[in-house]
Amino acid sequence: MSSIMEHSRLETALDGARRRDRRVFMPFITAGDPHLDRTEELVAAMRRGGADIIELGVPFSDPLADGPVIQRASSRALKNGTTMRQILDLAGRMRGNGTLGATPLVLLLYYNTVYVYGEERFARDAAAAGVDGVVIPDLPLEAGGSLRSMCNKTGLTMIAIVTPTTSVDRIKMITDNAEGFIYYTAVTGVTGIREGLRQELMGEIKQLKQLTNLPVLLGFGISNSQQARQAAAFADGIIMGSALVELIENSLGSEMPKLIERFVREIKQVI
């Protein structure tokens, strides 16, 4: 597939939502939890539920940005022997057999995984598999130049993260180099389920939007439809992971896809 095609799926989804004044929903699950065949079923379920973008986590032994729910999912996936190569093969299969359709696919992974796999090889193989974007929480802007260059060549979008503690000067530096969308974390620290949203969030995102024309998607700590509805009032999109991963953890196998589809549909209806 050409890099232009890979790049345009993400742009098309984001631009289409903006033109229709609709909020984007990007649900997250960990690839290989409970196993890769089930991951494909769950991706299909998220798409049926109305996901605008789908985010797959690449399991890692020390996921510093993830809370206990997603850490356990990573551990289960690694115990099952899930590898980067298998995940990229799965992505290519889902892109080829219609499971993903035109829905953009974003990978969340840690830099060590890319380093071990090889930056150039990763950028090439991920793009060839139909991956559209990558989020790497532990790769600072200053250290990501070579990978960013390789991703640009293959059409992969490197998605920038901004946190509540990021200074204005640094936000300007990040947004000057950003593409796709901005991933804004609703809280400092790790992912996980929280009781509510911070009151300061609306002002923080308003300030961020003054510094970038890119859509701002809000993640980390949004765990139910009420919080999603509140966040959708000021963010361009919602990212949810821990709530879905916990649903997977607590579900019987045969029920899992239906529960995930229902959850995604409920969130889409309120945002």
Image (cartoon, rainbow, N blue to C red):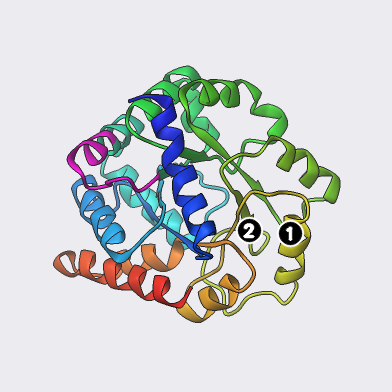
Where is residue 168 shown, x and y percent of the image? Answer: 84, 50
Residue 164: which numbered mark, if any?
A: 1
Residue at 56% over, 71% down: 232
Q: Is residue 34 visible?
A: no
Q: Nearer the viewer, residue 63 or 244?
A: 244
Identified at 21% across, 69% down, the residue is 258
Residue at the limit of the structure toward the right, as seen here? 169
Give the quadrant of residue 235.
bottom right
The residue at the point 35 percent across, 68 percent down is 264
Q: Position of residue 94 (x, y in %)?
A: 24, 41
Count of marks overlaid on the render: 2
Q: Please state, as top left, top right, bottom left or bottom right, where the N terminus lies in the image.
A: top left
- Amino acid at circle 1: Pro
Cα distance between the residues tagged 2 and 1: 7 Å
Identify the element where label 1 is drawn. loop
Residue type (three-letter) at the residue carrying disc 2: Thr
Q: Please indicate whether residue 176 sits to the left or right of residue 259 in the image.
A: right
Give the x, y percent position of residue 141: 69, 34
Q: Which residues are magenta?
A: 92-104
Query: What is the x, y in percent for residue 98?
Result: 20, 44
Residue at 34% in and 26% down: 128
Indicate yes or no whether the magenta region holds residue 119.
no
Of the pair 152 and 43, the residue shown nearer to us? 152
Tag on residue 185?
2
- Residue 168 lies left or right of residue 221; in this view the side is right
